[in-house]
Image (cartoon, rainbow, N blue to C red):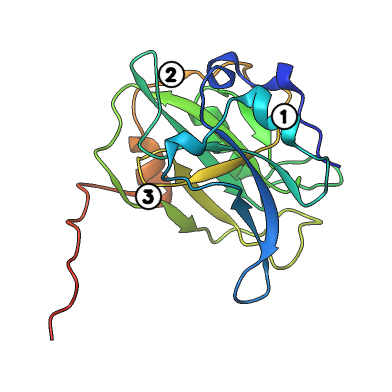
Amino acid sequence: MVVVVQASVPEELAQLRRWCTWASTPNEQGRLTKRPDCSTKNPAAWRTLEEVLLELEPSELGGIGFVFTGGVQLGGRTVYAFDLDACRDPMTGAIEPWALEVLDAHGRSYTEVTPSGTGLRQWVRVRTPPPFLRRAKVKLKYPAAPNVPAHKSVELQVFGYGVPQFVAFSGRHLPGTSSDIDEVPDLRWLCERFGVEAGAAEPAKGLPVG
């Protein structure tokens, strides 16, 4: 059952009108994927946290989400979220060393356990963000945490660099991390350590001719 406690959501995020709900539906390969209930490109369709919590029907296959499209600013800083997949034992709560390294490198800023219980999501406010992320999702050559389903890959993904996207939000605050979204200088350590590639945005491609 999905239970989101509003008090566990950082107040700065709770005040933004960037919320939606999502449901797990099969993709073209038959694997379940999280799909938002509205377009991530249409701000008029996004709601407040209170609105989506009232709409939400508790389920193992659904929850609430936060929309990052266009970038999010809090206090003059850009908000990013780091998805750390297959790094947490859902039975014991033990976290893999590489994921702990990420949490520590960013001051143990607000972190939640993902809906599956097998990953973490750390939120930060970045003082000097990169202009763009060309490679924001990286597969890592680490073993998955114990008791993680075999179909889950060990990956690091960065959200918040402006493209249309959302993240599922569990509100399961990880003990030992801040209740606030803390500020960090930049993302250089993350890029250098894990191969996230920063740079200018690629120009839009036109339709082929002929």
For the residues labelled 3 and 1, the Cα–Cα distance comes to 34 Å
For the residues labelled 2 and 3, the Cα–Cα distance comes to 20 Å
Q: Is residue 173 visible?
A: no
The answer to whether residue 174 is above or below residue 207 is above
Circle 1 sits in a helix, a strand or a loop, which is it?
helix
Q: Residue at x 73, y 34 (%)?
A: 55
Give the residue type that dot 1 points to. Leu
CB-based contact (under 8 Å), mark 2 and mark 3: no
Pick whichever, 181 or 25, lies toward us.
25
Return the disc, 3 or 1, that comes first in the chain's sequence: 1
Q: Which residue is mark 1?
A: 53
Return the disc, 2 or 1, that comes first in the chain's sequence: 1
Q: Which residue is mark 3?
A: 196
Pick whichever, 131 or 20, lies toward us.
20
For the residues labelled 2 and 1, the Cα–Cα distance comes to 28 Å
Name the quarter where the C terminus is drawn. bottom left
In-image side of 70 versus 178 (left or right): left
Circle 3 sits in a helix, a strand or a loop, which is it?
loop
Spot occupied by residue 18 in the image (x, y as percentages of width and height): 51, 31
Return the disc, 2 or 3, that comes first in the chain's sequence: 2
Give the residue type that dot 2 points to. Glu
How crowded pointer 3 is (Cα within 10 Å; few <14, some 14-19, many 20+) is rated as many
Mark number displayed over residue 183? 2
In-image side of 15 versus 161 (left or right): right
Give the residue type that dot 3 points to. Val
Spot occupied by residue 5 in the image (x, y as percentages of width and height): 77, 24
